[in-house]
Image (cartoon, rainbow, N blue to C red):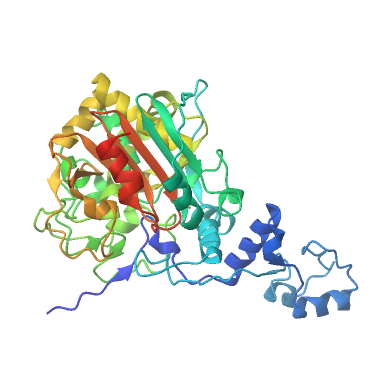
C-alpha cells in the first residue's frame, strides 16, 4: 500500500497547533494580568533578568513589567526581559495541537489556556489581519421569555461550555453563560468568539448573497474563469461540488491536512493565500466525486466570491451581516497576511459575539421562511444535499453533531438521525463544541460556544431541536 504522508497545513485551525512556546505563555500571563485575574499568577522577574536589573540599577515595580535599561544588551532580549514576567499556578497540560476531541478530560487550567488560544493568541502573538464588518446602525433586538433549565446549569458548571442560547417562537427562551467562578469571568456579551468550522457555513451564507446580487450565476456555475485554479483539479468544476465537498480531492486533502508532501510547512492559518495553496495542486487530477470534508473547499468558495466581487467584496460582507443579519457588534473573517485580494487572501476563520451568532442564524431562518432570494439559495442547497455515508474513516472519532448529522448541504450539516430527512433542519458544527442548529420549519435555533465538546450534545442541542419545549 502506498504510504500516505500526512503533513499538517493550516486552513482553519491546525496551523496554530504547536506546543506552547515561551512567547505564547508570556502573552497568556500578560492577558491574565491585564484582565485582573492575578489569582492565577505568581509575578516575579526571572533570575537572569533580575541580575541585569541589579547590574543596571533599575527599580523593580510590583506589576511584573520592568523599566528597560537605556543601553539594551542582546542578553536583555535573549532572556525575554522585555516580556511580562510571571508564572502561573494553573495545572496546564500543553498539547501538540488543540485539545484532542475524544478520550481526554481537560482540567480547568488547560481549558483557561485553551480560551486564550481560541480568542486572544491570534491577535496578541500572530497579529492576524481581518476583513471586518462594522455593526448595523439598527441592530436586531431580541425579545425574551426566559425559562430555567437546571440540567443546563449543571452542564455549565462542570463542562467546557461557555454560552448557550435557545430561540423558539420568535424569542429567546434560554440564555445561559458559564458561571463567573468558572469561565464567565473571561468573556461577556461583547466578546467575539471563534467560529472554528462554523465559519464554513458563514462562508456559504456569503456565497448565497453573492449569487443573489448577480456576481455568481448559480450553484451550478462552472469555475472556469479563475486563473488561480487553472491546471488544478478544481478548475471547470461546478460551484456545488465545492459547496458539498465533492470536488474529488480525496487523495490530496482531508479536513485541515494535506495528504501529500507539501512545501507549506509550519505556516500559520492567516499566512498562506490561495495562490500558495494552488501551487501545491498543479497538474492534480480530479478523483471520485464523493464527500470529502476539507477546509480547502471552503477556502476556495470564499475566495471565489472575493474574485467575482472584486472591489465589492466588503459590500457583500456588509450586505450579509450588517444589512441582513443586523449585527450589534463587528464580525470578521481572517485575512492572509502580507497578501492581496488578487492572490486570494480571504480566510474562513470567523468571529462574532454570542448574540450575533444567533442574529445571523435568525436572518437565515427569516430568509427561508420569507422565501427571499437568499432563502431560495438555502432551500436549493438543502434540496441538493448529499449523504456522508462514504465517510467511514472519520479520523476524528465518534463525533457529536457529526455523527448525528448523516448528510451535508452546502456547508451545513443535515439528515439528522431520528428526524425526517424532508424536514428542513440544518446545522453548523465547529471544533470544541461550536454549534448552530436551525429548524427552518418549526422556527427553532440552538447556539452553543465552548472550549471542548465534553457536554451532552444530545440533551441540550439535539433534543430541543427535535422535540421543542
Q: Is residue 372 visible?
A: no
From the viewer's perspective, is residue 78 above or below residue 160?
A: below
Q: Where is residue 30 in the image (x, y as percent from the top left)?
A: 67, 60
Count numbered badges in the picture. Answer: 0
- Residue drawn at 76 percent across, 80 percent down: 47
User: Most extreme residue toward the left, as rendered?
Assistant: 288
- Residue drawn at 38 percent across, 69 percent down: 265
Q: Which of 424 and 68 is in front in this view?
A: 424
Location of the N terminus (image quadrant):
bottom left
Q: Which of 155 and 348 is in front in this view?
A: 155
Q: Position of residue 446 (x, y in %)?
A: 36, 39
Q: Can residue 436 be seen in this view?
A: yes
256 sits left or right of 386 in the view:
right
Q: Which of 316 and 48 is in front in this view?
A: 48
Which quadrant of the figure has residue 254? bottom left
Q: Which of 423 and 197 is in front in this view?
A: 423
Which quadrant of the figure has residue 72? bottom right
13 sits left or right of 176 in the view:
left
Q: Where is residue 122 in the image (x, y as percent from the top left)?
A: 52, 55
- Residue drawn at 86 percent across, 68 percent down: 60
From the viewer's perspective, is residue 248 above or below residue 313?
A: below
Q: Where is residue 149 in the image (x, y as percent from the top left)?
A: 44, 41
Location of the C terminus (image quadrant):
top left
Amino acid at each position: 500500500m502506498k504510504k500516505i504522508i500526512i503533513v499538517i497545513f493550516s486552513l482553519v485551525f491546525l496551523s496554530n497547533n504547536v506546543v506552547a512556546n515561551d512567547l505564547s505563555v508570556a502573552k497568556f500571563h500578560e492577558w491574565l494580568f491585564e484582565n485582573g485575574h492575578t489569582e492565577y499568577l505568581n509575578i516575579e522577574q526571572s533570575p537572569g533578568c533580575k541580575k541585569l536589573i541589579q547590574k543596571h540599577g533599575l527599580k523593580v515595580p510590583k506589576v511584573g513589567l520592568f523599566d528597560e535599561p537605556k543601553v539594551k544588551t542582546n542578553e536583555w532580549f535573549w532572556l525575554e526581559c522585555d516580556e511580562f514576567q510571571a508564572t502561573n499556578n494553573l495545572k496546564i497540560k500543553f498539547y501538540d495541537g488543540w485539545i484532542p476531541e475524544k478520550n481526554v478530560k481537560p482540567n480547568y487550567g488547560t481549558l483557561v489556556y485553551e480560551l486564550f488560544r481560541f480568542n486572544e493568541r491570534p491577535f496578541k502573538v500572530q497579529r492576524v489581519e481581518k476583513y471586518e464588518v462594522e455593526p448595523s446602525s439598527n441592530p436586531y433586538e431580541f425579545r425574551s421569555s426566559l425559562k430555567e433549565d437546571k440540567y443546563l446549569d449543571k452542564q455549565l458548571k462542570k463542562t467546557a461550555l461557555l454560552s448557550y442560547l435557545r430561540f423558539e417562537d420568535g424569542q429567546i427562551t434560554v440564555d445561559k453563560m458559564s458561571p463567573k467562578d468558572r469561565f464567565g469571568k473571561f468573556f461577556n456579551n461583547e466578546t467575539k468568539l471563534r467560529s472554528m468550522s462554523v465559519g464554513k457555513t458563514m462562508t456559504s451564507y456569503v456565497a448565497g448573497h453573492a449569487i443573489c446580487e448577480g456576481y455568481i450565476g448559480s450553484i451550478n456555475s462552472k469555475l472556469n474563469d479563475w486563473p488561480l485554479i487553472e491546471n488544478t483539479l478544481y478548475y471547470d468544476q461546478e460551484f456545488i461540488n465545492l459547496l458539498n465537498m465533492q470536488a474529488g480531492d480525496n487523495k490530496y486533502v482531508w479536513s485541515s491536512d494535506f495528504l501529500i508532501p507539501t512545501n507549506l510547512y509550519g505556516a500559520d492559518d492567516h499566512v498562506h493565500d490561495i495562490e500558495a495553496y494552488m501551487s501545491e495542486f498543479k497538474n492534480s487530477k480530479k478523483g471520485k466525486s464523493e464527500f470529502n470534508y476539507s477546509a480547502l473547499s471552503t477556502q476556495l468558495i470564499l475566495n471565489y466570491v472575493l474574485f467575482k466581487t472584486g472591489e465589492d467584496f466588503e459590500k457583500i460582507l456588509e450586505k450579509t451581516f450588517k444589512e441582513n443579519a443586523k449585527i450589534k457588534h463587528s464580525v470578521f473573517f481572517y485575512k492572509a497576511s502580507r497578501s492581496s485580494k488578487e492572490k486570494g487572501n480571504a480566510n474562513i476563520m470567523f468571529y462574532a459575539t454570542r448574540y450575533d451568532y444567533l442574529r445571523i442564524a435568525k436572518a437565515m431562518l427569516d430568509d427561508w421562511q420569507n422565501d427571499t432570494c437568499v432563502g431560495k439559495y438555502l432551500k436549493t442547497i438543502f434540496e441538493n444535499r448529499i449523504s456522508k455515508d462514504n465517510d467511514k474513516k472519520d479520523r476524528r472519532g465518534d463525533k457529536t453533531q457529526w455523527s448525528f448529522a448523516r448528510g451535508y448541504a452546502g456547508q451545513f450539516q443535515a439528515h439528522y438521525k431520528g428526524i425526517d430527512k424532508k424536514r428542513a433542519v440544518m446545522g453548523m458544527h465547529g471544533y470544541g463544541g461550536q454549534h448552530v442548529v436551525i429548524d427552518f420549519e418549526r422556527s427553532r435555533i440552538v447556539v452553543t460556544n465552548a472550549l471542548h465538546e465534553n457536554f451532552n450534545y444530545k440533551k441540550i442541542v439535539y433534543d430541543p431541536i427535535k422535540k421543542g419545549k
